[in-house]
Image: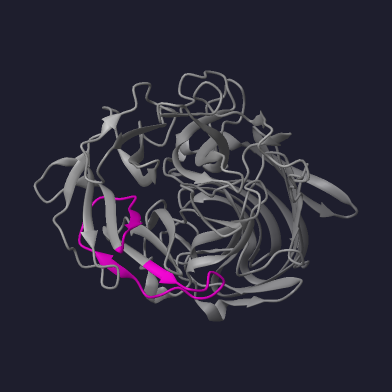
Amino acid sequence: MKYNNPVIKGFYPDPSVCKVEDTYYLVCSSFQYFPGVPIFESKDLLNWKQIGHCLTRESQVQLGKVGSSGGVFAPTIRYNNGKFYMTTTNDTTRHNFYVWTDDIYGEWSEPIYVDQGGIDPDLYFEDGKAFFMSNGKDDYGIGGIAQCEIDIETGGKLSPSRSIWRGTGGRYLESPHMYKMNGRYYLMVSEGGTEYGHMVTYARADSISGPFEAYPNNPVLTNRNLGGYEVQGAGHGDLIQDHEGNWWMLHLGFRQIGRWLTYHHLGREVFLTPVTFSEDGWFTAGHNGTTLTSFETDRIPTHVVQQEKKIFTFENTEWNLDWCYLRHPVAENYVLEFDKVKLKGTGVTLDVPESPTFIGIRQRDFNAEISCDVQLADGEAGITLYMDENHHYDLAIRKDKNGYKVIERLNIGDIKSVEYEVDLGSTSQAPLMIRASHERYSFLIHANGKDIPLGTAQTRYLSSEVAGGFTGVLIGLYTCGEGSMAEFSNFKCEYL
């Protein structure tokens, strides 16, 4: 059968996966957004359903005043002796930690910290022992993938951190994952940076501490030489074996906006690529070492149908799963109901690394129509296409001394410009609409029985290539201004 990539669309980067009985579980990075580290489950590796988050309490992760693309980096999920473990980095505080649970649908523990630096930590369990790995320097000042044995109950180190492999020479050695297969230890990493040069490499050894021998044909997976190809940045992978014994890699990649337009704004997404072991014990990945937008394979059972949700509304999403906040929300500013949300504004705007009154859902594809009715009492409220505090497009109702108006505002770096406005007079409610395509967003309102266009803006200015960072565009509902209050209803995001 044929399946399509990505298997999880939108800003869900740095996937890690484990399998327990007949179910796969996957986690992704969340950076400055809260709750942290979304969790998905699947029975077939193609259809993924979000079931929760690992970090749901402020005590678990410090996000106050964390800048965009700071906060929670690159988690790993593993299962051992009846418990799930998720280890990650708060890159802002430079702390590696893990949390655990014996109920994947319930709450996770308070963080347990490990005194080892670097980012992208990994946990490996064997014979009652737990090993912790991350990139960076070891206890002797040697760079590479550092490894130590830890007490899994306390996080305390039982051995010094020691560099076990230094990669193949690519920049930004990261995302280590250790496996034992057919009596050998395999260490898979990423190099090249999580941009257009991203790649997956690996090595193997007879001992968990090495010495490691690099795969002769590294990188095992990269799209770095596929100029003019939609999928780029393939890397940061994790291996998993399916129910029939086949091996797969779940990894990140991103879709650029056009064949020759090297910009991406949806964020890094989750791709599924087949892995094949040869008789000599080395493995290959994908189509000649690349990942594709679709694969024809007989590995997927014929009864499995890849499904995709096309319409997102208040009624068919869940506030605590599909939606998220910027940093830790002030709970009393949000009234979340089945078919509407009421937001109370503060003096905090979208332009600062704090916690504005904002609730967002990830943009999952290029072509979409986004609409919402907004009723404003005072201040400003609307829809934002949010990349970071310096790069976002806002379609909003604003009240001033002359009444109400709808504005289209572009925020691109240091340039913040109201491009268009429509006077509503005393009318405090308006249906707002945004039409999205690969290259442009178009802004409209529905008034006097017709759609009134307010202008357009290029998607590239919300891309990682312009804004920098590691996130993607969120469709956010927001209000700002002391004492402001707004109600949002009839929200709909339909992918075309």
Q: Residue at x 67, y 42 (%)?
A: 365
Specify the color scheme.
Answer: one colour
Q: Position of residue 140 (x, y in %)?
A: 8, 47
First to last magenta residue range:
99-128
- In the rendered image, the residue lying farthest to the right is 449
Q: Is residue 175 visible?
A: yes
Left or right: 482 as drawn, with respect to 361 = left
- Whether the magenta-drawn stretch holds residue 120 is answered as yes
- Camera-side residue of 305 and 279: 279
- Camera-side residue of 378 and 474: 474
Q: Quadrant of residue 85?
A: bottom left
In the depicted structure, whether residue 96 falls above or below residue 340: above
In the depicted structure, whether residue 324 falls above or below residue 417: below
Q: Position of residue 190 (x, y in %)?
A: 37, 36
In the depicted structure, whether residue 119 falls above or below residue 111: above
**Looking at the magenta stretch, what is its main secondary structure?**
loop
- Camera-side residue of 428 and 363: 363
Q: Residue at x 61, y 60 (%)?
A: 50
